[in-house]
Image (spheres, helix red, strand yellow):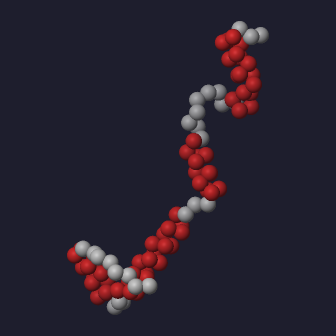
Amino acid sequence: MRITARIDASYEQKLKTIQQITHLNTTEIIKQALDLLYDKAEKTKLTAKEKNQQLIQMLAGTAEGPEDLSENYKDYLHQGWKKKHGID
């Protein structure tokens, strides 16, 4: 694949400096830069399970209410209805 790119003077200087230090041509520098970015992207890519786990961690502890709500929700619901509607 042939690539044509426009870069400003600061990137041109960076490219020349890298060429002087490494003795690599422009093609090799671009290949190595792409490899580095690709590796970084692969490391940050999360599986669906990991994304769900992150979401759960973010949401954990954000709700208000009794700590045993998940275990005793029926009792709390009954108490709420009793208060609101006078149900016994």
Q: Kindly indicate the quadrant of the structure image that contains residue 15.
A: bottom left
* Front-most of residues 2 and 24: 2
Quadrant location, the C terminus = top right
Which residue sits at x=74%, y=10%?
87
Which residue sits at x=74%, y=27%?
72
Residue 20: x %, y % from top left: 29, 88
Residue 81: x %, y % from top left: 70, 16
Q: Say if 20 sits above or below 86 in the image.
A: below
Residue 24: x %, y % from top left: 36, 89
Q: Kindly indicate the quadrant of the structure image that contains residue 83.
A: top right
Q: Say if 43 sits above or below 87 in the image.
A: below
Residue 86: x %, y % from top left: 71, 8
Quadrant location, the N terminus = bottom left
- Residue 21 can be seen, yes or no: no
Q: Residue furthest top?
A: 86
Total numbered circles: 0
Which residue sits at x=61%, y=46%?
56
- Residue 26 can be seen, yes or no: yes
Q: Say if 58 sits above or below 39 in the image.
A: above
* Front-most of residues 29 and 67: 29
Which residue sits at x=59%, y=41%?
60
Q: Residue furthest right?
A: 88
Q: Kindly indicate the quadrant of the structure image that contains residue 73.
A: top right
Q: Residue furthest left?
A: 9
87 left or right of 64 in image: right
Q: Say if 68 sits above or below 48 in the image.
A: above
